[in-house]
Amino acid sequence: MAKKVIKKNAFYAQSGGVTAVINASAAGVIETARKHKHKIGKVYAGRNGIIGALTEDLIDTSKESAAAVKALRHTPSGAFGSCRYKLKSLEANKREYDRLIEVFKAHNIGYFFYNGGGDSADTCLKISQLSETMGYPIQAIHVPKTVDNDLPITDNCPGFGSVAKYIAVSTREASFDVASMAKTSTKVFILEVMGRHAGWIAAAGGLASTKDTEIPIVILFPEVSFDKPKFLAKVDAHVKKFGYCTVVVSEGVKSADGKFLADQGLRDAFGHAQLGGVAPVVASIVKEGLNLKYHWGVADYLQRAARHIASKSDVDQAYAMGRAAVELALKGKNSMMPIVVRKSSKPYKWAIGAAPLAKVANVEKMMPKDFITDDGFGITNKCRQYLEPLIQGEDYPPYKNGMPQYVRLKNVAVKKKLSEFKL
Amino acid sequence: MAKKVIKKNAFYAQSGGVTAVINASAAGVIETARKHKHKIGKVYAGRNGIIGALTEDLIDTSKESAAAVKALRHTPSGAFGSCRYKLKSLEANKREYDRLIEVFKAHNIGYFFYNGGGDSADTCLKISQLSETMGYPIQAIHVPKTVDNDLPITDNCPGFGSVAKYIAVSTREASFDVASMAKTSTKVFILEVMGRHAGWIAAAGGLASTKDTEIPIVILFPEVSFDKPKFLAKVDAHVKKFGYCTVVVSEGVKSADGKFLADQGLRDAFGHAQLGGVAPVVASIVKEGLNLKYHWGVADYLQRAARHIASKSDVDQAYAMGRAAVELALKGKNSMMPIVVRKSSKPYKWAIGAAPLAKVANVEKMMPKDFITDDGFGITNKCRQYLEPLIQGEDYPPYKNGMPQYVRLKNVAVKKKLSEFKL
């Protein structure tokens, strides 16, 4: 007689800022779980991340058709809703852990898949310790996701490659535009990109320029203190040589005094404080210092939602991470995170590995110093070799009447069994 | 014996703000001219538009390979450089007209193809009158191009459809993102788009929401005076119903006193004036009026350079307009502009027509009143029926190592024959 398999349900949730490919990871989790119904019962998704677990607001993904789950692979954003909510430590807020166990017990949840970045890895680590700390048996696996690309150990983070591709493509396109106009109009174009702590996304702007297609680009990294005279001299030199210049500026750039460059204390005519971006600040610096005509753009959510120009590498890896998370769970693992292991850059080859969550949580991977050129305004060849594979390949969504067909799930709620819980 | 064909060279130039598809028109002109070498000798392009003609800075497009010219079809921006330079009237600046004739004579130019918007149509009209006014025989044909979609008679303008598609797709994607985050984070996303005089581009944001995929969108048109209480009430109602709201705001929105909303007299901490966009102004209004968390983006050049997500209808029409311009010239026409004639919206069918330049120049086509909903914040079904065909179809550029392969021409200069000319 076969050994009796204990069948448990799984919990899956999306956490933190969403990306163009986090739903591909969801598809990887759900489709893989569906193939192992002897061990994994239903996959319940948390509505709005961990908040869904705390409030017993669970979504029954078994109500979604195979086609709908498949379509998650080409749908940006978080299909179940995400949240910015960090669990405190067990000591600081035991009430929340008690509640999670109550919900997990009520819904027979034995697998916990949490799809997020650094903060979420910390949450997932805490959940993974519930067996030890509170005697509730659970296997918690973290599914990596962050456009910030700052998780350690993994070669890169799903979500980043697609932002990088969007920024590289957009920078190339806008630079072509400026080059055409520079004779009598705009000479400097400034594009503000995400990345408050690390310059990974800004670095992707450097990919717009290649040997085939040289483009004068000045990158302002959060890792490099803003030096106005040096910056103006660099832009001036580019404009003199090429006729134009493109500036890619990270939202997190700081001046030497440690203040965000964006934080210029802007006031309107009535003296009200205005929240501006860093792009208009850099534009004003260019105007004042060089008297050159400029334009500026702020990509904001467009960059991380741009599934229409997602990187195929990124989509594949996001899906693979979701699948691998379930496979790790099926192997009996706990407190782990699947990772991308780079085997070769040219041609690009990667494999799936795994890292213990204890080594992932609360560690931020910064850009290596040797990824930034000596003058502080560009990317080195080493950086380029790292970045290029991550934007490889296109993976277009289907279109209908000119618009991408992104899926919206039914998101049917699981019947509640418990009393209400106040967050 | 066959009638002797007088062979003349052609001049082609790009004018005003460039687009994702103006080079497709260039390809249409050059490829069609190459098929009629018995009548059209060489196609000389003006480097930086009409300035190239005035300064005798001509590019010999016959030096470009067939492959390079074909690649123009998928390359955004103006491959020969554009300019913002409006010829004055003959009376006000005869010197420039004398010079143009001098250059045309020196290079045996008998065809003048000018690729631009309203101002350029005016320039082209003036050139078309040179036979009459100054006795120099020339056929001038205008090739329509403008993201502003404000040329009259033609159903739409090449360049607009691709911006519309970019804005519609980006608005849908960013809205999906905000919807995921709204529970604990951003509830209002504001996207600033081009269109100083007419709301055509802002209207395209409305295409993000369809029957299949409803999205709460508030559009701020330049045609509608900004009414703060009404706007805040609308956003508030959407957030209450849907949990979030997306605002698409035209850069040209004005308050009731006729001032641009963007022009808020922003000052930095030192009292220096700052040139901001309208998106941060709207963001501040949302923050102050409703105290909702917001994000904002400014698409700027990204929207009109985004060849990676160009509309196939638009690319096809841009090419067809270039081809038709040459065909009109071959038929002996002067002072004309090829136009798009809509035959049917569903299914989309269009044909090529022609309009006399005298009826095109200096006429601006505004959005019809019945394209905007009664509350002033949305598009009507009539508007939707007009816009939807224009974003139909995808026409992806080729990629290499994850990046779109946009062509750069050799742009070999034609040997100068004349003395220098000061602009």
Image (cartoon, coloured by chain):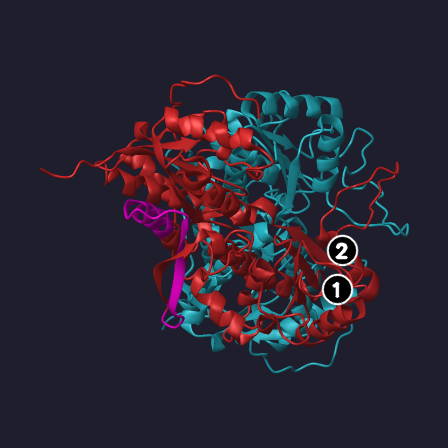
Chain colours: A cyan, B red
Q: Which residue lies at the image location 71% right of the left edge and 26% below the top edge?
A: A290
Residue B216 within the magenta-colored segment of the rendering: no
Position of A195 compared to B32: left or right? right
Image: A118 above or below B388: above
Q: Earlier in the sequence, mark 2 or mark 1?
A: 1
Position of A150 compared to A281: left or right? left
Alpha-carbon span between mark 2 and mark 1: 8 Å
Q: Quadrant of residue B83?
A: top right
Foreground residue among A146 and B51: B51
Report in which chain the residue with disc 2 lies.
Answer: B
Image: A387 above or below A401: above
Q: Which residue lies at the image location 56% right of the left edge and 78% below the top edge?
A: A412
Looking at the rendered structure, which numbered label has been put on residue B226? 1
Q: Which region is colored magenta?
A: B319-347
Q: Residue beneath label 2, please?
A: B261
Q: Is residue A1 visible?
A: yes
Do labels 2 and 1 touch, CB within 8 Å? Answer: yes
Q: Position of residue B250 (x, y in %)?
A: 65, 57
Say what amino acid the circle numbered 2 marks: Leu
Report in which chain the residue with disc 1 lies.
Answer: B
Q: Is residue A194 visible?
A: no
Q: Which residue lies at the image location 55% right of the left edge and 54% below the top edge?
A: B148
Q: Position of residue A296 (x, y in %)?
A: 65, 42
Position of B171 compared to B324: left or right? right
